[in-house]
Image: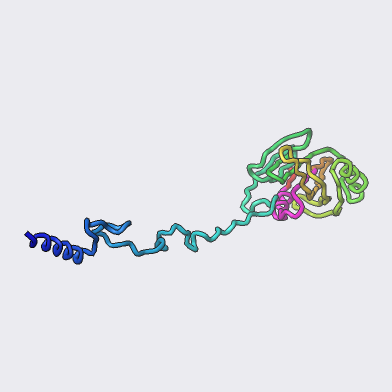
């Protein structure tokens, strides 16, 4: 009768020694009896969610032309007036007010104004008649140069000046504009071709295309 308890105790000792667990088979908190403890600390780099160097670098900002620059690939179409023609940028909005036809895109504008006069303009006549009129009608008018130049259509008086644009109806912003006014004359007819764009805009080539395209019919 005393042998049975001894065998039971021995069996318990053997089980504990083999399993490494306390009686009742209780596992260490956070583990299971049949699992290998997770010894890794933190998250592997490829799973951390942190952006790589390529992902975190900022994209290169594409630079745009200064405001008012007419694109180099701008196409031109002929505008046919009464007794003359001139090329203007394709796609620009066309409006008319009195005898003036305007072509506008963003900050640039072309105005074509025909009139009748028996006397051809000169640098002297422009100084005494045109300049005073411009000073009254152009906000903050500032005269540049008055010169006589040659275009394919013949001799022409060129007036350069600066002035403020009208305030934008949405933003109220006022732009400082540069003006080139070409006065073409033949046989009692005169056409004032005025090219307008922001000061410092690089429109030399487009304006040369327009002014050089003027032809009498």
Dividing the picture into quadrants, the one containing residue 99 is top right
Q: Residue at x 91, y 47 (%)?
A: 125
- As drawn, the residue found furthest toward the left would be 1
Start and end of the magenta stretch? 192-213
The quadrant of the picture occupied by the N terminus is bottom left
**Which residue is outermost to the top?**
98
For residue 70, side relative to residue 151 (left or right): left
Asked if the stretch drawn in magenta spans residue 200, the answer is yes
Q: Is residue 155 magenta?
A: no
Q: Is residue 141 above or below residue 9?
A: above
Front position in the image: 36 or 80? 36
In the image, taking residue 1 as reference, residue 35 lies left or right, namely: right
155 over 170 or under it: above or below: below
In the depicted structure, whether residue 54 falls above or below residue 134: below
Q: Position of residue 19 (x, y in %)?
A: 20, 63
- For the C terminus, the quadrant is top right
**As drawn, 97 above or below 197:** above
Q: Determine whether, in the image, residue 164 is placed left or right of residue 44.
A: right
Where does residue 47 sit, x and y in percent of width and height? 40, 59
């Amino acid at each position: 009768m005393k042998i049975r308890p001894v065998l039971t105790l021995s069996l318990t000792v053997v089980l504990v020694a083999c399993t490494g667990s306390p009686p009742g088979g209780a596992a260490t908190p956070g583990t299971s009896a049949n699992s290998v403890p997770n010894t890794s600390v933190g998250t592997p780099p490829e799973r951390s969610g942190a952006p790589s160097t390529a992902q975190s670098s900022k994209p290169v900002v594409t630079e745009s032309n200064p405001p008012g620059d007419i694109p180099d690939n701008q196409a031109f179409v002929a505008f046919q007036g009464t007794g003359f023609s001139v090329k203007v940028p394709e796609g620009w909005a066309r409006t008319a007010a009195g005898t003036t036809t305007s072509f506008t895109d963003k900050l640039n504008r072309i105005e074509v104004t025909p009139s009748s006069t028996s006397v051809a303009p000169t640098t002297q006549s422009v100084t005494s008649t045109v300049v005073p009129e411009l000073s009254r009608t152009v906000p903050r008018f500032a005269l540049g140069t008055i010169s006589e130049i040659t275009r394919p259509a013949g001799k022409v008086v060129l007036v350069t000046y600066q002035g403020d644009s009208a305030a934008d109806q949405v933003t109220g912003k006022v732009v400082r504009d540069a003006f080139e006014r070409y006065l073409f004359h033949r046989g009692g007819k005169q056409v004032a071709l005025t090219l307008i764009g922001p000061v410092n805009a690089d429109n030399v080539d487009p304006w040369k295309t327009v002014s050089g395209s003027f032809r009498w019919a």
